[in-house]
């Protein structure tokens, strides 16, 4: 009886488990040969996939960085082009204006010789008006205080004509006021020397 108690006690303290599946399946020899290679192939494929993933990740990071760098450069170049467009527009406008000024200067003539001759004949305040007409014609109006000044002016006109500074002088108006002041309108053609 002692033995029976001991046996019951051992049975109660022992944990038993029931496994209905076999721990290792028995495979035919051809399949077990292929199974060894399958483990190696799985390892190689896993290594290849991890390496490929790392390469793709590296390429993605490199290309992302390159794209960001190029976009920054594009922004800088766009700003530089916009600045150059503004500068080019100003230069183009300036070039057009210079061409217009050249045309004006080509047909523009200096009035300095006309003024020099006129100032030799009469100067302000005696000279009251000056106008330049076509074909080098000048018309002046002179305000004189006496007949002696009028005679002096006529002598100067004759001297300028003889010196070859003017030609075809003419008196277009002459008036004497009650107080003796004289207003004369004179026209002449200035001879330009090149």
Image (spheres, rainbow, N blue to C red):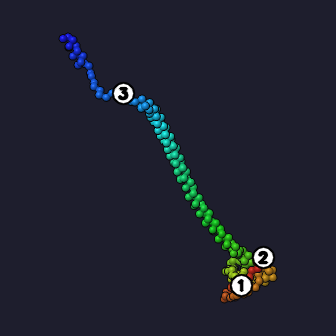
> Which residue lies under the disc numbered 2?
193
Circle 1 sits in a helix, a strand or a loop, which is it?
strand
Circle 2 sits in a helix, a strand or a loop, which is it?
loop
Front residue of 143 and 86:
86
Q: CA distance from mark 3 to mark 2?
A: 127 Å
Q: Residues within 10 Å of mark 3 (few under 14, many from 20)?
A: few
Dot 3 or dot 2, earlier in sequence: 3
Q: CA distance from mark 1 to mark 3?
A: 138 Å
Dot 1 or dot 3, earlier in sequence: 3
Q: Nearer the viewer, mark 1 or mark 3?
A: 3
Q: Quadrant of the C terminus?
A: bottom right
Front residue of 93 and 65:
65
Residue 116 visible to an observer of this rendering? no
Furthest toward the top, the residue is: 2
Residue 163 visible to an observer of this rendering? yes
> Which residue lies under the disc numbered 3?
24
Circle 3 sits in a helix, a strand or a loop, which is it?
loop
Dot 1 or dot 2, earlier in sequence: 1
Res. 143 image quadrant:
bottom right
Front residue of 147 and 48:
48
Residue 46 in the image: x percent, y percent?
Answer: 45, 36
């Amino acid at each position: 009886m002692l033995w029976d108690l001991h046996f019951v006690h051992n049975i109660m303290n022992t944990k038993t488990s029931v496994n209905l599946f076999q721990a290792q399946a028995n495979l035919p020899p051809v399949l077990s040969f292929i199974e060894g290679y399958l483990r190696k192939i799985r390892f190689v494929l896993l290594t290849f996939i991890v390496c490929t993933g790392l390469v793709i990740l590296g390429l993605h990071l490199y290309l992302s960085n390159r794209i960001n760098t190029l976009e920054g450069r594009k922004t800088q170049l766009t700003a530089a082009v916009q600045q150059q467009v503004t500068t080019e527009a100003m230069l183009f406008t300036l070039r057009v204006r210079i061409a217009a000024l050249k045309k004006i200067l080509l047909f523009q003539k200096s009035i300095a010789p006309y003024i020099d001759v006129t100032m030799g004949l009469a100067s302000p305040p005696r000279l009251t008006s000056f106008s330049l007409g076509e074909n080098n014609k000048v018309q002046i109006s002179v305000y004189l205080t006496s007949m002696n000044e009028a005679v002096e002016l006529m002598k100067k006109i004759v001297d300028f004509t003889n010196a070859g500074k003017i030609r075809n002088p003419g008196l277009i108006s002459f008036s004497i006021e009650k107080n003796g002041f004289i207003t004369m309108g004179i026209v002449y053609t200035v001879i330009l020397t090149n």
